Image: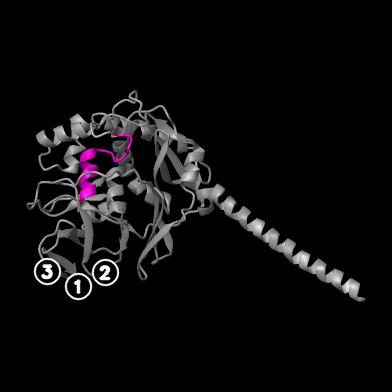
Amino acid sequence: MNRTIREALSLFGVMSIFVVSVTFAASGRQMDRSKLQGGARNSGWRILEPVTYENMSVFPVVASNTRSTDEFITLDEGLSSGAVTVSERGAEIMRRSRDGRPAPTQQYGGASVNELVLVNHGNKPLILLAGEMVSGGKQDRIIGKDRIVPVGAEPLPLDVFCVEHGRWSNGGNFSAANTMVHPSVRESAAVAQQQSEVWNSVTRGSNSASVSPGGMGSGNGSAAAPAPVITQRSLGDTASVEAPTVAYDKMYNNSKVNKSLDPFVDEIQRRFARATKDLKGERVVGVVIAYGGEVAWSDIFASPQLFERYWTKLLRSYVVEALARPGTKEVATLKDAEEFLHPLKGTEKIESDPDVYRWREVTQGRYVSIELQALKPADILLHSLTIHKTGVETAVMK
């Protein structure tokens, strides 16, 4: 082989490597683009066309392959059965000793607005989701962050936010409220993590910038948008007459404020059941929620069974948010919902309790995704939450 041939072959080899490299690079870009286009489907999810009523659209999220979640218990189930107790800090609580007998444990320190004590007495790990309410004690509270409490854990100092302003007196033991606060309040608890912002969201109705302080839709400046059913003014009137302690449960569950709530919930439930009754080989594991043309929220679970255990109180919470936003004829599209679930790339926070759970938050602009992953008894992504942040700066409530 002469020198000319060797040089030609060498050049061909270099060009071949270059072509292969470019091909792989292009393929990588295509894979990244495909991942974005597939969105949630790469996680085994598929989004259906929306169920729409008034100013709210519910996109069912379905999956064919899911994981069993029977080995976990929810907060409402645990409190109702006695497997879980929640107490004010400083109260004497009862634990079970190794032989099964009650063993009192004194919690030191006085009661605190933003901390309770939780004990899991049961034989299943406990799931806690940000925004779940417990009633009683000195004030009603909501859970501040998603987490898992293992079986046999020591009494857990639990971060919470108060949603009953004005009362600080013994209301007995905490019980299941079977309530999830609506997305604006959940956002303030899960993302802002500030008591003042939680208060503002409770009394404002919605954090959405399309809602003015008086409750009229401002949107893009048009005065044509119908006023929300639940307004800041109506909440204030209710608090002054029927809920002097500004209790979330009383403010949002009285005839003056929520007379449209039950019919709205029933209609969405009816349409949702009709839209998902004939699924073949797939089950509903979550939803994406839009208000008008804005996709705002999603809750997706590891199994259809776990979704169903939360669905009733989640739906009610979504409808409260809808009633606190202006009416609109805009409707979000399936493409909007799929884009909403694209993986975020931004600031990441991770918290972990070894061999129990992993909590991960990613923030990209006005979007936040939060994942709760169980590590034992099995490695399962239990809950995935995506939020379009709508929080607005407001004065701290006194």
Give the labeled residue for mark 3: 108
Secondary structure of the residue carrying tag 3 is loop
Q: Is residue 41 magenta?
A: no
The residue lying toward the viewer, choosing from 272 and 234, is 234
Mark 2 vs 1: CB contact within 8 A: no
Secondary structure of the residue carrying tag 2 is loop
Give the labeled residue for mark 2: 152
| Front: mark 2 or 3 | 3
Percent position of residue 238, x then y: 15, 34
Q: Amino acid at mark 3?
A: Tyr
Q: Is residue 130 visible?
A: no
Q: Amino acid at mark 2?
A: Gly
Does 258 sit above or below residue 77? above
Percent position of residue 367, x then y: 40, 49
- Among the 4 quarters of the image, the one containing residue 193: bottom left
Q: Earlier in the sequence, mark 2 or mark 3?
A: 3
Q: Give the Cα separation between the discs numbered 2 and 1.
A: 10 Å
Q: Amino acid at mark 1?
A: Ser
Question: Counting other residues with Cα less than 10 Å from the Cα at mark 3, is it few (<14), some (14-19), or many (20 or more)?
Answer: few
How many discs mark residues in the rendered view?
Answer: 3
| Front: mark 2 or 1 | 2
Q: Give the Cα separation between the discs numbered 2 and 3.
A: 20 Å
Q: Quadrant of the N terminus?
A: bottom right
Mark 3 vs 1: CB contact within 8 A: no
Q: Which stretch did the figure color magenta?
A: 196-211
Give the labeled residue for mark 1: 97
Percent position of residue 104, x then y: 12, 69
